[in-house]
Image (spheres, rainbow, N blue to C red):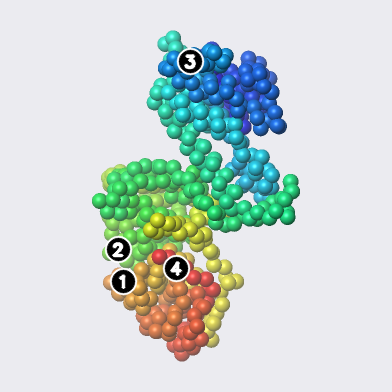
Amino acid sequence: MNALLSVSDKTGIVEFAQALHALGIKLLSTGGTAKLLADKGLPVTEVAEVTQFPEMLDGRVKTLHPKVHGGLLARRELPEHMAALKEHGIDTIDLLVVNLYPFEATVAKAGCTLADAIENIDIGGPAMVRSAAKNWKDVGVITSADQYEAVLAELKATHGQGSCKLSDKLRFALSVAAFNRIAQYDGAISDYLSSVTFEEEKLSEAYVPQRALFPGQSNGIFTKVQDLRYGENSHQQAALYRDLHPAPGSLVTGVQLQGKELSYNNIADADAAWECVKSFEAAACVIVKHANPCGVAVGLDALSSYSKAFQTDPTSAFGGIIAFNRVVDGAAAAQISKQFVEVLMAPDFTPEALEVFKAKANVRLLKIALPTRGGQTDWERGRNAMDAKRIGSGLLLQTADNHELALTELKVVTKKQPTLEEMEDLLFAWKVAKYVKSNAIVFCKGGMTMGVGAGQMSRLDSARIASIKAQHAGLTLQGTAVASDAFFPFRDGLDVVVDAGATCVIQPGGSMRDQEVIDAADERGVAMVFSGVRHFRH
């Protein structure tokens, strides 16, 4: 049995090669990999010895040769293939270990030159991988160090039985993984090159090209996490996919501790809740129903924040999705368990909390680590950099709405100034409104939502619904702060929230009738703040 090893990332390759050698497998290799193995005392044959052709063009040409690809592509069950190998003095290659030049890592570096990017496009590696993967019945192809263990396990097991080979099942799985890796690699190259704004006059070895935010071709790569029972409705099929490299603290990094399988709607609602609760630094609870927050509050801990959030809309909270940004302890669990909840998410659960939910086996518990505070990129902060929306035969892409409002961005436009307490409520309401479907109107007071109006065609109706919900929950909107995700185009929008009891308002501003609305606020004796940014969420 012959194995060809040619890796850019040499993690674990020496140990793997030693294990192959111990099984009596002949080692072939190239360049730096061959030198490394030889330095470790392993008997290794350089590919140049096999091809009788030296590596050339700074290593660009070394494995692109019939003695390599013939050994990979020959079908062992076809006598004519084997005869051709014998005629031309070609040995079979039964195991290929290749990982590719680090193109993705190279172009991710700040200041990456076009020359560096191009130089890190692997040619011979993908060619060998494709040959081996195509001939999967005869060749095992390894493209990642995390595959070494499974391959060795099978080789050792069969070696003990007098042969040394991989099962069809493993070889096919390795082939699929290999073609997936090539697709990822080619997609990354296409994404990069399609984003380059080419400026011929600037060409040099030091040329760092400008890159468009949206490339000429988008090659999104996602890997399947699981099939789902069905989609939004039972007549639809569905599956959950994740990014190739999920951001820390994102929903798909979570671990389900108990409960039934998550449904399509569970996952969508859970994401809405988790993204909202992550945005708070204080201990927070978010209750979501049909992708809209129906109760949000901050408190001292999980229990206090939940107790406040639940008050907003107990009716909608029934069968909802609940998210915390603090550990859920026994006291919080005992209170939550009194209600019907579909999914409960938190950074962790105490043993006492887990014991409480043992009696409610259908409740889905998700443990999700929070991203590290102070991350420098959207990814590090656990956020998507891009949002996508499918349309008929197309895709709408946009940068994700990751805007965080700073105090310096606020502009008080009325004669009345908000008090410090009102300003805190305004900022809280604004944070919540960002996660409510448009048109959004959110009333808040004392670090909790008092009324939420979502998804209406008229902003007036959203405000009226928020008021009705507050009445049903036994809450008063007197003295509340209210947030609107977009500007008030007429004063009637302001009048309806003030009539409901609001004493201060935050809205983007930017309407042709801003002055009319400001005058109305002065007339009604309320404070109004412009944020300068809109948060539509359709």
Residue positioned 33% across, 48% down in the render: 238
Residue of label 2 = 316
Q: Which circle marks residue 469 in the picture?
A: 1
Residue positioned 48% across, 45% down in the render: 221
What amino acid is at disc 2?
Ser
What amino acid is at disc 1?
Lys
Write down the quadrant of residue 323 in the picture. bottom left
The answer to whether the residues at label 1 and label 3 have Cβ atoms under 8 Å apart is no
The answer to whether the residues at label 2 and label 3 have Cβ atoms under 8 Å apart is no
On the image, the x and y values in percent for residue 120 come to 64, 39
What amino acid is at disc 3?
Met
Residue positioned 68% across, 20% down in the render: 39
Badge nearest the viewer, 1 or 4: 4
Residue 483 appears in the figure? no
Specify which label sits upstream in the sequence, 4 or 3: 3
Question: In front: 359, or 2?
Answer: 2
- Dot 3 falls on a residue whose secondary structure is helix
